[in-house]
Image (tube, rainbow, N blue to C red):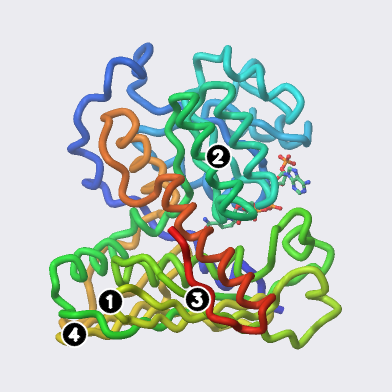
Amino acid sequence: MSSRRDFLQKVSLGIGAAAFSDLPAVAAHINRGQDKQLRVAIMGLGGYANIVAKGMQECKIAKITGVISGTPSKIETWKQKYNIPDKNTYNYETVAQIKDNPDIDLVYVITPNSLHHKHVLQIAAAGKHVICEKPVADNAKQAREMIAACEKAGVKFYIGYRLHFEPHTKELIRMREAGEFGKIMHVNNYAGFKIGDPTQWRLKKSLAGGGAMMDVGVYSLNGARYCTGEEPVWVTAQEGKTDPVKFKEVDETITFQLGFPSGIIANCGCTYNFNHVEGLKLMGEKGWAEMNPAFGYGPIRLNTHKGNLEAPDVNHQAYQMDGIADCILNNKPDPNVSGKEGLKDMIVIDAVYESLKKNGAKIFINK
Ligand code: NDP
């Protein structure tokens, strides 16, 4: 049986050697001691945390210095593997103490979706910068509270949108911004995979917040936003459920349509119940783009009216972490990965679920 791993494909090759070689010296306020690096603690040592940690071994300016976990045996393994001292390890009860730890600048929250809100509030209260995995929260109300808490605490809040650091995706966005596709006319994005273990948290509403839409629908939706450069003003959505037992609590397959201010319609979809569903298509008056694979860990491919893009296959997690470290250490603007970007997607996801509740009714989005 195929798995999420099949959908997300293999962890990709190496980080391009030159990519961060021209990074300027880091800001003095965060550059304590000799290591000019952003010191990161990972919260929740599950599947994706392991992929992030492996990728981070290629980072130039971000480094794992701590962990927060509810599983003592994992803490022991990570201590050995990543040379983490005992004093930089926490569990979910002791995490508030992280505020007194000068070895940790930022916490990367990689716990189940419905815990993101609570965990980000805890990290903000501890005065540390935070990256939160997608989806940012269960709903837009929670996302707004997270943004407000981080602003109040004076810490930076990012979302783990790794594709915004990926060269093929960046080129697609650059071409669209440069007008190379002309007026964008239509977008068509799909993401999904067949989910395995029926007992996992992803199928429990209390921990996942929702199903395919929350998990992989975010890719179709975020992709539609970066294909158009606009924010949706209305949404319609439909759910297909072929296995009501497995998907008793969460959505299985969703198709949704996004209407944008210029009149563009994006047709999007996501699923938890079949494989080989991935791709992004942008159709413009002067040109077109197709990405497949578009959303996995790589390699990502971009084909356009100009031909196939020759760009390096990079390690997404390493690029994301060095990219965010560069923003923080050098006070640079982030490439569309702030908590506010997570909120923009969450507003649309709320509208998708509202449309489903109302039998596919058109939901207008209030800004
Ligand atoms: P896992 O189940 O593999 O790991 C989640 C970890 O969270 C657990 O191992 C556990 O770590 C911790 N945790 C804390 N409380 C609970 C709880 N009540 N139930 C289960 N786990 C708990 O999930 P993933 O790593 O696959 O996903 C985590 C997050 O990362 C999700 O939000 C997901 O959407 C996101 N993700 C993002 C990807 C991307 O490409 N950007 C790819 C995959 C996932 P511990 O034992 O250390 O406490």
> In the image, what residue type sits under mark 3?
Val
| Mark 4 in CB contact with mark 3 (< 8 angstroms) | no
The front one of 91 and 301 is 91
The residue labelled by disc 1 is: 262
Residue 352 rendering spot, x and y as whole percentages: 58, 72
Rendered image: mark on residue 235: 3
Residue 54 rendering spot, x and y as whole percentages: 52, 45
Above or below residue 118? Residue 252 is: below
**Within-10-Å neighbours for mark 1: few <14, some 14–19, many 20+:** some
Q: Quadrant of the C terminus?
A: bottom left
Comes first in the chain, label 4 or label 3: 3
**Within-10-Å neighbours for mark 3: few <14, some 14–19, many 20+:** many
| Mark 2 in CB contact with mark 3 (< 8 angstroms) | no
Q: Nearer the viewer, mark 4 or mark 2?
A: 2
Comes first in the chain, label 1 or label 3: 3
Comes first in the chain, label 2 or label 3: 2
> In the image, what residue type sits under mark 1?
Ser
> In the image, what residue type sits under mark 2?
Met
The front one of 253 and 53 is 253
